[in-house]
Image (cartoon, rainbow, N blue to C red):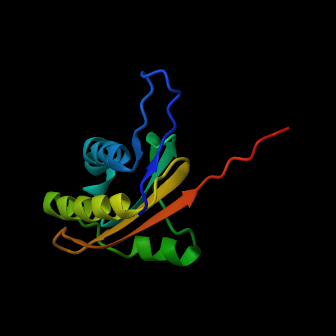
């Protein structure tokens, strides 16, 4: 990743600072730990988290609840025992966060984007796989 810098206005108050994802990573980790994990991730073995990024910082995070809708799915649900929900464990969360942090820090600066984080946990709650998808927004001036 090449180093990029913001442009200062020369007044001394607005100093140039490197453009990286370190602040964004900390904001996303905090949102995952405080909101996403207790509400959803600890109860579901797999899922998708969505983060709206603006100006290099977290704006909004979403917790997605995706379900298949079909007659076959409805019939399967009727014939299945209800088991207690076991999702991602704390140690699985820690592993996922370390991998996510590394991937985001290595990524080019994220200014305006939607960031998707997919995760899967095993039967024991450990993180087994995931995916990071970044959809960058490009703003065009209007004349």
Give the image location of residue 56, x and y in percent: 46, 43
Query: In this picture, is 28 found above or below 10?
Result: below
Is residue 87 visible to us here?
Answer: no
Horizontal side of residue 135 vs 48, given as left or right: right
> Residue sitting at 29 percent across and 72 percent down?
81
Of residues 23 and 19, the one nearer the viewer is: 19
Image vertical order of residue 8 relative to residue 113, above or below: above
Q: Can residue 2 be seen in this view?
A: yes
* Residue beneath the point at 34% across and 67% down: 119
Residue at the image position 27 percent from the left and 65 percent from the top: 99
Quadrant of image for the C terminus? top right
Question: As drawn, which residue projects farthest toward the right?
Answer: 143
On screen, residue 10 above or below 132: above
Q: Where is residue 38 in the image (x, y as percent from the top left)?
A: 25, 47
Classify 105 as above or below 59: below
50 vs 101, nearest the viewer: 101
Q: In this view, does 139 lie to the left or right of 128?
A: right
128, 133: nearer the viewer? 133
Label tally: 0
At x 57%, y 74%, the residue is: 71
**Image quarter (top left, top right, bottom left or bottom right) of the N terminus:** bottom left
Image location of residue 121, percent across then percent down: 26, 70
Give percent across and percent down for residue 8: 50, 32
């Amino acid at each position: 990743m090449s180093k990029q810098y913001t442009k200062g206005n020369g007044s001394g108050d607005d100093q140039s600072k490197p453009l990286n994802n370190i602040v964004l990573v900390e904001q996303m980790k905090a949102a995952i730990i405080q909101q996403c994990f207790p509400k959803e991730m600890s109860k579901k073995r797999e899922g998708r988290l969505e983060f709206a990024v603006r100006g290099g910082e977290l704006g909004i995070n979403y917790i997605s609840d995706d379900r298949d809708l079909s007659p076959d799915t409805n019939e399967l649900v009727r014939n299945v025992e209800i088991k207690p929900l076991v999702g991602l464990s704390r140690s699985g969360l820690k592993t996922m966060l370390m991998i996510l942090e590394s991937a985001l820090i290595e990524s080019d600066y994220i200014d305006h984007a939607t960031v998707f984080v997919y995760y899967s946990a095993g039967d024991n709650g450990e993180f087994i796989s995931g995916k990071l998808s970044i959809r960058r927004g490009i703003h065009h001036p209007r004349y």
